[in-house]
């Protein structure tokens, strides 16, 4: 599976030969050279309680990936590490092509303030905007695929918290 934006940048998941064989790649830069964005076994930034790495599954179609026209890449990934279990192993990261850095946007078991109340995230899912007539609306992707990430660097997700409350969260500036 791949994504393409209006700039002609392509991002895709793939498996390669080797012990850490799954990852996400893109053709970033003026020459369109292929760049590795993240690979299985890489350290996961933003996880402070232990040394966590990206687990296998980066090439799975269930691991969402979104490419904005700014060439920012947002992806969902599974973690592994000494303090990682099924309650805190999922997250969403953003790749900044200007800095080459990954930023953790959201992680299950994270605490988020919703309507003035701190809530612990249990599960989340990517959203695709739907307009008033019930039709899906393309937000960011130049390839015509629907997306919950826009060019204002905002990500829309559905969230279910440990107290069973639910919300739609918009993450970003």
Image: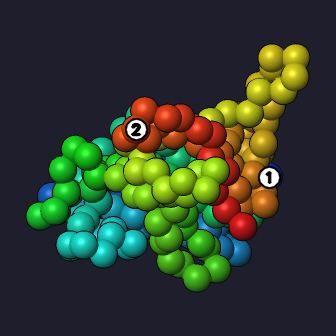
Q: Position of residue 98 (x, y in %)?
A: 64, 80
Residue depicted at 33% across the width and 62% down the height: 39
Badge 1 crowding class, 10 Å Cα cut-off, few under 14, some 14 to 19, many 20 or more, is some
- State whether residue 71 is above or below residue 108: below
Which residue is found at the position 61% from the left and 73% from the top? 97
**Number of marks in the image?**
2
As drawn, the label of residue 50 is none
**Percent coordinates x, y for residue 19 in the rendering:** 15, 58
Rendering coords of residue 99 (x, y %): 58, 82
Residue position for label 1: 6
Give the residue at the far left of this rendering: 82
User: Does 131 sit left or right of 81 as displayed?
Assistant: right
Which mark lies nearer to you, 1 or 2?
Answer: 2
Can residue 69 be seen in the rendering of this structure?
no
The answer to which of 33 and 63 lies nearer the viewer is: 63
Residue at 42 percent across and 47 percent down: it is: 121
Q: Is residue 15 left or right of residue 118?
A: left
Residue linked to disc 2: 163
Secondary structure state at the residue bearing disc 1:
loop
Mark 1 / mark 2, whichever is N-terminal: 1
| Between 126 and 167, the one nearer to me in the picture | 167
Q: Is residue 57 visible?
A: yes
């Amino acid at each position: 599976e791949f994504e393409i934006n209006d700039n002609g940048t392509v991002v895709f998941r793939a498996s390669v030969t080797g012990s850490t064989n799954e990852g996400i790649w893109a053709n970033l830069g003026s020459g369109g050279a292929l760049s590795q964005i993240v690979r299985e076994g890489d350290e996961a930034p933003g996880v402070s309680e232990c040394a966590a790495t990206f687990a296998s599954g980066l090439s799975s179609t269930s691991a969402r990936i979104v490419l904005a026209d700014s060439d920012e890449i947002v992806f969902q990934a599974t973690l592994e590490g000494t303090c990682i279990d099924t309650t805190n192993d999922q997250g969403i990261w953003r790749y900044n092509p200007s800095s080459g850095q990954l930023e953790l946007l959201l992680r299950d078991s994270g605490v988020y303030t919703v309507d003035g109340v701190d809530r612990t995230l249990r599960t989340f899912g990517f959203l695709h905007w739907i307009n008033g007539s019930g039709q899906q609306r393309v937000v960011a992707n130049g390839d015509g695929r629907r997306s919950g990430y826009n060019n204002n660097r905002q990500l829309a997700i559905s969230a279910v918290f440990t107290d069973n409350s639910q919300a739609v969260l918009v993450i970003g500036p």
